[in-house]
Amino acid sequence: MTTIIAIAAFVAVALVGWCIAEAKGKYVTYSNNEQEQAVLDQNRRQLEQNGYDELNIKDVIRTIATTGYSAV
C-alpha cells in the first residue's frame, strides 16, 4: 500500500513541476535592452559587410563530405 502512495506522490510532484516549467516558459519572457540590441545590430552589419551567407540544408549537404573516408 505504501508503494502505491509513493508512486502517486511522485506522479503528483512530477506533474506540479511540469506545470511550473510550462508556465515559466509562457509567462517569463526576455527582451534585449538597448545596448544588447545595438551590439546585435552591429554584429549583423559586420557579417553582411564581410560577405556572410547563411546556408540552407541543400547547400550544407552539397558542401560536406557524405561519401565517407577512404583509407587507401
Image: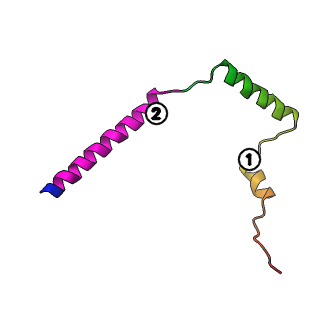
Closer to the chain start, of discs 2 and 1, is 2
Q: Is residue 5 above or below residue 49?
A: below
Residue 21 part of the magenta-drawn span: yes
Indicate the position of residue 12 as horizontal and vertical percent values: 26, 44
In the image as oriented, which residue stretches furthest toward the left? 1
| Residue 53, image quadrant | top right
Q: Residues within 10 Å of mark 2 (few under 14, many from 20)?
A: few
Indicate the position of residue 11 as horizontal and vertical percent values: 27, 48
Q: Which mark is residue 6?
A: none
Residue drawn at x 80%, y 76% is 70
Q: Residues within 10 Å of mark 1 (few under 14, many from 20)?
A: few
Indicate the position of residue 49 as horizontal and vertical percent values: 87, 32
Residue 33 part of the magenta-drawn span: no
Residue drawn at x 12%, y 57% is 1
Q: Which residues are magenta?
A: 4-29
Q: Which mark is residue 25?
A: 2
> Marks 2 and 1, how far apart in space?
29 Å
Identified by mark 2, the residue type is Gly
Residue drawn at x 14%, y 55% is 2
Q: Which mark is residue 56?
A: 1
> In the picture provided, is 22 more to the left or to the right than 57?
left
Indicate the position of residue 21 as horizontal and vertical percent values: 41, 37
Residue drawn at x 28%, y 43% is 13
Front tag of 2 and 1: 2
Secondary structure that dominates the magenta span: helix
Identified by mark 1, the residue type is Asn
**Which quadrant: the C terminus?**
bottom right
